[in-house]
Every structure is written in structure tokens, then in C-alpha cells.
Image (cartoon, rainbow, N blue to C red):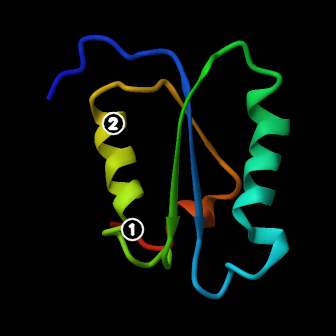
Amino acid sequence: MVVEQIIPGWATYLRVSDEDKQSPERSFAMQRHSIQKQLLTPSTVPFSREYTDLLSGTTPNRKDYQEMLSDAETGKFSHLGLYRADRFGRNTV
């Protein structure tokens, strides 16, 4: 698939696994706050979409993760904000 135009905008991806969901230092709220402070606020690029999953990072078939990959492939956003790389996933798939 060839993307003709990438729409300028930030997408964010937040994930907590079952073991993380009660941990304040890895919560959705903390991830969102950190991304907002470090990436979104200083940027002039508009915010587009937030994707969230409550599932282990070793599982590639996460609903919002798959939707985010599809949206990225079709150019629905130009920037992706993550709290940490391990929130994105924990495998090579």
C-alpha cells in the first residue's frame, strides 16, 4: 500500500498489562501525563488519537495496537508518542 499523504498529528499508545494495572507508575494516567508533558505540549503538531490496551505486551493481537498499526500504515497520523518502548510491545512481531 502506498500512502499518498500523511495527516499531520500525534497519536499516542498506552498499554498496561494485568500485572501493571494497579501500579501507579505504569498506569494509563501516568503514561498520558508523561507523554503530554514531554511530547505533546511542546509540539505544534495537533493531537489526533489515543490508542489504549489492557493486555500483555507479549500479545501482538491487541485491538488498539492493531488499529494503530493499520492507521499508521494508511497515514492517519505523523507522530507516535509512547511512554516507554516496553509499553509498545515485548516481542519482535
What distance separates the C-alpha of mark 2 from that of mark 1? 20 Å
User: Which residue is found at the position 27% from the left and 29% from the top?
Assistant: 74
Which is in the foreground here, disc 2 or disc 1? 2
User: Which residue is found at the position 38% from the left and 76% from the top?
Assistant: 59
Using the rendered view, name the quadrant where residue 60 is placed: bottom left
Image location of residue 3, percent across then percent down: 24, 20
Q: Is residue 64 above or below residue 92?
A: above
Amino acid, disc 2: Asp
User: Which residue is found at the position 82% from the left and 22% from the top?
Assistant: 42
Image location of residue 75, percent across then percent down: 34, 25
Dot 1 alpha-carbon crowd within 10 angstroms: few under 14, some 14 to 19, many 20 or more: few
Using the rendered view, name the quadrant where residue 86 is placed: bottom right
Q: Is residue 4 above or below residue 79?
A: above
Residue to which mark 1 is pinned: 92
Q: Is residue 85 above or below residue 78?
A: below
Name the N-terminal-most of marks 2 and 1: 2
Amino acid, disc 1: Thr
Q: Is residue 82 above or below residue 11?
A: below
Quadrant into which the N terminus falls: top left
49 or 57, which is in the foreground?
49
User: Which residue is found at the position 64% from the left and 16% from the top?
Assistant: 45
Quadrant into which the C terminus falls: bottom left
Considering the numbered disc 2 on the image, is that residue within a helix, a strand or a loop?
A: helix
Residue to which mark 2 is pinned: 71
Image location of residue 14, percent across then percent down: 60, 56
Dot 2 alpha-carbon crowd within 10 angstroms: few under 14, some 14 to 19, many 20 or more: few
Using the rendered view, name the quadrant where residue 22 is placed: bottom right
